[in-house]
Amino acid sequence: LAKTTQPISMDSYEGQEVNITCSHNNIATNDYITWYQQFPSQGPRFIIQGYKTKVTNEVASLFIPADRKSSTLSLPRVSLSDTAVYYCLVGDIGASNYQLIWGAGTKLIIKP
Amino acid sequence: GAGVSQTPSNKVTEKGKYVELRCDPISGHTALYWYRQSLGQGPEFLIYFQGTGAADDSGLPNDRFFAVRPEGSVSTLKIQRTERGDSAVYLCASSLRPQNTGELFFGEGSRLTVL
C-alpha cells in the first residue's frame, strides 16, 4: 500500500485559495488518489477522487501531474468553516482487499 | 437518518471490562469497515467486511478484539478485557464497493474511554 506525505499544518485566510500538496512516490498503476476532510468529533468525509490530470467538483479541484507521484488539493475561496484536517490517500479501489493507509493529515486553519 | 449510525457515542468503562460498539451502515452498502482513531492521528484500519464475512481482519491488534456482521448489515465490534490503551474513537464506515469509487461513508464514531 502506497504511503503519502503531506504537511502537518497550514494556515490561510478567508477568501484565499488554499493548495495542499501530497507526495505519493510509490503510487501503483491501479491506485486512485482520494482526499477526505475531517471536522472535530466527526468522521472523515469524502471530498474528491482522481486518477490523473484534473478533477473538479463543487467543493474542490484535484491536480495530478503526469507522473502521479504527487497531487494537489485546491480549495477555492476558503471560509472559516473549511478549518479541518485533510487526508490524502492512495489505493486500488478495485482490489478485493481495498484498504487505505491514513497518515496524520494536514490540519488547515483558516483565519478571519 | 440516511447516514452511518454508531452507538454509543460515548462509552466510559473500567479496565478489564467487556465493551460492545455497534454500527448501522447505510442501507444497501455491502462493505463495512472499522477504524480506530487516537487524538492527532489518522484512522487506523481494524477490519473490513464484505457482506457477512470478514474479508480482511489484519488490523485487529490482538485477540481481545473481535467483530461480527451476522446478517450483512449491522456490525458489532467487541473488545474483551479492555485496557487503557484501547481508549480511542472507534469509527465505522460503509461503502457500495465494489460497485463504486470506493468512497467511504463514516459515522460520527464511538468514543471509548478506559479508566
Image: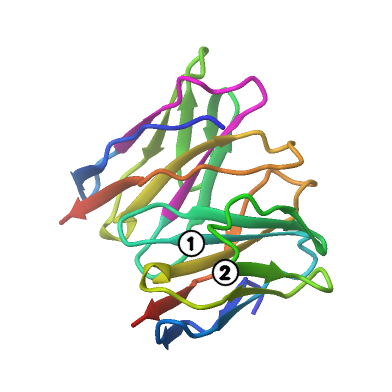
Q: Secondary structure at mark 2?
A: loop
Q: Which residue is mark 1?
A: B36
Marks 1/2: CA distance? 14 Å
Q: Is residue A108 left or right of residue B62?
A: left
Q: Is residue B31 visible?
A: yes
Relative to A14, say whether B51 is above or below.
below
Q: Is residue B61 magenta?
A: no
Extent of the magenta region: A18-37
Q: Chain of mark 2?
A: B
Q: Is residue B32 left or right of residue B110?
A: right
Q: Quadrant of residue B111?
A: bottom left
Same chain, marks 1 and 2?
yes
Q: Which residue is mark 2?
A: B64
> Residue A34's spot in the image, x, y percent?
54, 39
Q: Amino acid at mark 1?
A: Arg
Graded by Cα atoms within 10 Å as few (under 14), some (14 to 19) or many (20 or more), the crowding at tag 2 reads few
Q: Is residue B71 left or right of residue B95?
A: right
Q: Residue furthest top?
A: A67
> Residue A8's spot in the image, x, y percent?
26, 42
Residue at image point 15% right, 56% down: A112
Q: Amino acid at mark 2?
A: Arg
Q: Secondary structure at mark 1?
A: strand
